[in-house]
Structure formats: structure tokens, C-alpha cells
Image (cartoon, rainbow, N blue to C red):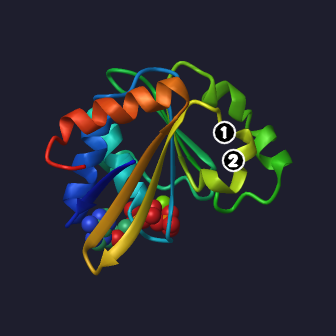
Amino acid sequence: MLILTSTSPEETMEIGGILSQCLLPGDLVNLGGTLGAGKTLFVKGVGQGLGIDPGVVTSPTFSIINEYEGTKFPLYHFDLYRLESDLDLEQVGFEDYFYGSGITVVEWGDLFTHYLPQDRLDICLKSSAPNERTLSIVGHGERGRQVEEKLRGLFPCTF
Ligand SMILES: Nc1ncnc2c1ncn2[C@@H]1O[C@H](COP(=O)(O)OP(=O)(O)OP(=O)(O)O)[C@@H](O)[C@H]1O
Ligand SMILES: [Mg+2]
């Protein structure tokens, strides 16, 4: 597990940007943790790293999925918080995204873990002080662990 601390909204975005440099088409990142911890801000940072204006990246709470073109790869941004059933997720055709040719970031993926790919990066964001967030990052499967290691290499001062 890689544990990072962010002390500002900007720093959370920056960490998202750094993660984007470790990702390849087909990768999936599952964002969990507490309400309002900074998941959407984190995705804005990932988007910025992929050449997407962070101003256009907004929470897909109602649309379930927002798709962004990017200059590197497409970004598929899900928010599963309001989804009520497996059927709702099946109706948006999630498999085309989760196993597609872009980068998928899922807010509240833990609510539907049975649909998440084995290979993925789980990030749990928790508020540790008013402006401080702790990010606990764990890669699953061969590819997930590869991404975790690559990210660890970009934060050499952490454990
Ligand atoms: N270090 C920090 N990192 C991220 N956000 C922070 C930080 N400090 C304060 N904040 C504030 O926390 C809020 C995070 O909002 P954001 O919408 O990104 O959270 P979220 O996890 O996506 O929420 P939700 O659970 O509703 O989807 C923003 O208002 C932001 O300014
Ligand atoms: Mg959000």
C-alpha cells in the first residue's frame, strides 16, 4: 500500500495528474472513501494530465458517466453513488468502458465491486484534518500492482 497525504485541493489534483502519467488505455482506478473527500477533484487532476481542461470535468452524479476526449487517451469518469441496481449499471454498458480503450476512473466503485475488473488501482480518500486528505493506494492484479509500483517511484520520500 502506498499512503500519500494532500494538504490542499490543488495538491490532490496534482497527485491525480502524477497518477495519470502512470496509466495506460484499459486501466481502471476505483475511488472510495468518505463523502466529499476529494474524489472528483482527483479526477480533474487525472483529466488535466491527459490533456483535458479540468474546468469541464464535473461530477457525473446524475449522468453516471462522463466521457472526455483527452489528447493522450479518452477518460471515462463514473460516479456510482446514486445507482440503485446492477441493472442500472448494465444499462449504461459499463463493460465497454471498463474494458475499453480509455482510462476509467470510478467514484464509489466499492458499491459495485463485483463488476470491477480484477486488475485495478483502488484509492481510498479520507479527510484527516479540515484541508488534509489521506490517500491509501493499493494495486490489484498484475497490472494494478505495476501501476502502484510506478506511482511509488514518483513519490520516493513515502513508504
Ligand atoms: N486536501 C484536499 N483535497 C481535496 N479536496 C479538499 C482538500 N481540502 C479541502 N477540500 C475540499 O473538499 C471538497 C472535495 O470535493 P469533491 O467534490 O472533489 O469530493 P468528492 O469526494 O468527489 O465528493 P462526493 O463524495 O460527493 O463525490 C472540495 O470542496 C475541496 O475544496
Ligand atoms: Mg464526487
Q: Contact (CB < 8 A) between labels 1 and 2? A: yes
Which amino acid type is shown beneath numbered disc 1? Leu
Bin the neighbour count of mark 1 within 10 Å (Cα to Cα): few under 14, some 14-19, many 20 and up: some
Provide the residue designation for mark 1.
116
Q: Nearer the viewer, residue 126 or 97?
A: 126
Looking at the image, which residue is at 63% across and 24% down? 99
Q: Residues within 10 Å of mark 2 (few under 14, many from 20)?
A: few
* Residue positioned 37% across, 73% down in the render: 127
Residue 77 makes an appearance in the image: yes
Looking at the picture, how far across and down is residue 158, in whole percent? Answer: 20, 50
Q: Quadrant of residue 68?
A: top left
Give the vertical position of 116 relative to 109 (above or below).
Answer: above
| Relative horizontal placement of residue 99, taking residue 145 as reference (left or right) | right
Left-right relation of 139 to 79 = left
Left or right placement of residue 130 versus residue 147 in this view: left
- Label 1: element kind: loop
Q: Which residue is mark 2?
A: 113
The residue positioned farthest toward the right in the image shown: 87
Residue 142 % position (x, y):
51, 24
Real-space Cα separation, disc 1 to disc 2, in angstroms: 5 Å
Residue 26 badge: none
Given residues 29 and 65, the one toward you in this image is: 29
Instruction: State left or right for residue 113 relative to residue 134.
Output: right
Q: Amino acid at mark 2?
A: Thr
Q: Nearer the viewer, residue 86 or 7?
A: 7
